[in-house]
Amino acid sequence: CYRIELLLRFDNNTTTLLNKSRISDEVAVNTGFGLECKSQHRLVSGDLNVTCTSYAGWTGKFPICRQMDRLLQSERKKKRSPRRITRI
């Protein structure tokens, strides 16, 4: 696998970080790397671990991290019950 493919696939995501300094230009098959959510973000779906499987293949479902403040706001909205208007 090549470093550039990993960067193109995972480093364009604005919510995850990839430690680029650890990755050489050519990566051996079955070598894994870890991604992490940016500060104040939490993983909501996908996988933060990727592995080189073949010439240009990387395993791992694309990670989606969300900002915790926004995540908490959306969870609060779900918990609110709808207001009922009563007529007198």
Image (tube, rainbow, N blue to C red):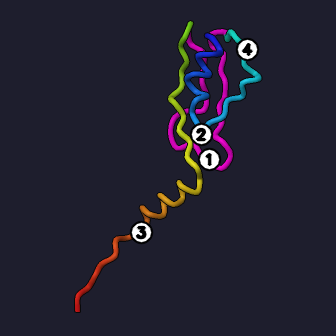
- CA separation, marks 2 and 4? 23 Å
Disc 1 designates what residue? 41
Q: Amino acid at mark 2?
A: Thr
Q: Which mark is residue 15?
A: 2
Q: Are marks 2 and 3 in contact (CB under 8 Å)?
A: no
* Percent x, y of residue 50: 60, 24
Disc 3 designates what residue? 80
Quadrant into which the C terminus falls: bottom left
Choose the circle earlier in sequence order: 4 or 3.
Answer: 4
Choose the circle earlier in sequence order: 3 or 1.
Answer: 1
Q: Amino acid at mark 3?
A: Arg
Discs 3/1, front: 1
* Percent x, y of residue 37: 63, 40
Q: Are marks 1 and 2 in contact (CB under 8 Å)?
A: yes
Q: Nearer the viewer, residue 13 or 81?
A: 13
Choose the circle earlier in sequence order: 1 or 4.
Answer: 4
Q: Is residue 41 above or below residue 53?
A: below
Choose the circle earlier in sequence order: 1 or 2.
Answer: 2
Choose the circle earlier in sequence order: 2 or 4.
Answer: 2
Discs 2/3, front: 2
**Region of the chain picked out in magenta, as a range:** 28-54
- CA separation, marks 1 and 4? 27 Å
Q: Label 3: state its secondary structure.
A: loop
The residue under the point 37% across, 70% down is 81
Q: Amino acid at mark 1?
A: His
Q: Nearer the viewer, residue 25 or 81?
A: 25
Q: Residue 45 vs residue 17: left or right?
A: left
Quadrant into which the N terminus falls: top right
